[in-house]
Image (tube, rainbow, N blue to C red):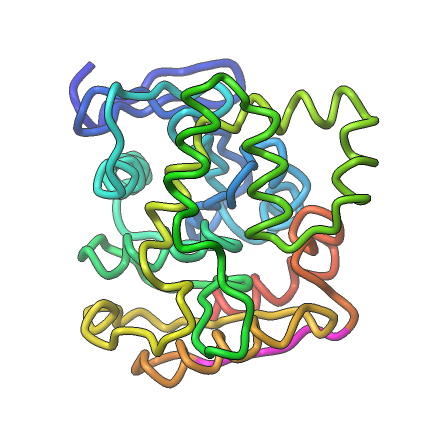
Amino acid sequence: MSAGQEQAVGGGGRVVSADGTEIAFEQSGSGPVVILVASALADRSDTAKLAALLSERFTVINYDRRGRGASGDADTYSVGREIDDIAALIAHSGGSVSLFGSSSGAVLALRAAAAGLRVDRLALYEPPFVVATTDDCPPRDLARQVTTLLEEGRDSDAVKYFMTEVQGMPGIAVLVMKLMPKVWAGLTRLARTLPYDIAVMGDTQQGKPLDAAEWASVHAPTRVLTGGRSPVAFQRAARALTDLLPRADHRTLPGLNHSAVVMAPKKVAPHIAEALQG
């Protein structure tokens, strides 16, 4: 198949990205098209409940980012290739779409819009920019540390390192997760994609203002959502982003935290729907 072609796969399908990588997706519902872009250590199974809720109002394309789930991968990675994956899904949809992304997936959605893809609207949940020196930043050698662990075959340790050093999860919480073999095995299977999300974030987590030029070409109406129980850094990042974008606003959802997209989709879905319907 050439880039952009698709074939049926059970209840979903596959598109072929520009580099020949097959990207698997599930499509449901009817109406305006929205593509769901998953976060780090997540695949389409993590957004399946959200997809089901949104499919009551939208045609939802819930896909596995490259290297995850049923999607393929290439020998080398670039953020541009992930943007090409979204472009192939847009071509499959027959026109322009809206994008919803959470965490680093929100930043990938932003980068797709900035690259000039036909994006009607954006809804973003807690893009994890770090814009203040007072907020905790990931280690500056994060990419090297994770890459070294993966090269040594220590995928489980790479997941633990990312969770504690980037996501700020207490060690005891990670230990509890490791005691759930099925859960931990699923996370470990995605460890090899951690460098992808680190690349997507670039240098946006170093406690400095966002580069206005980097996002200047994002003109789609954008709603940035944050949870009221999340660290204040997410609120600062949301305000910084909405100040940069010409057609953006910010809403805080009371009682929710960074895991809300997976853990409380019924509370998040109406706000996404409102943002994407205008």
Q: Looking at the image, which residue sits at the far bottom?
A: 243
Q: Is residue 178 magenta?
A: no
- Of 172 and 117, which appears nearest the observer? 172
Looking at the picture, how far across and down is residue 53, in whole percent? 66, 48
**Which SS does the magenta portion mostly show?**
strand
Quadrant in which the N terminus appears: top left
Residue 210, how many percent across, how many down?
Answer: 33, 74
Residue 253 lies in magenta, yes or no? yes
Residue 203 appearing in the image: yes
Viewer-closest of 106 and 99: 106
The residue drawn where x is 31% and y is 69% is: 220
**Vertical placement of residue 162 versus 67, above or below:** below
Tally of numbered discs:
0
**Residue 98 seen in the current view:** no
Compared to residue 114, the image places residue 167 above or below, namely above
Side (left or right) of 262 relative to 118: right
User: Whole-percent x and y of residue 141?
Assistant: 39, 48
Q: Look at 31% across and 41% down and name the residue there.
A: 86
Q: Which residues are magenta?
A: 249-254
**Which residue is depicted at the point 52% across and 28% down?**
191
Image point (23%, 61%), residue name:
114
Side (left or right) of 142 relative to 228: left
Residue 189, position as x, y percentages in the image: 56, 21
* Closer to us: 261 or 5: 261
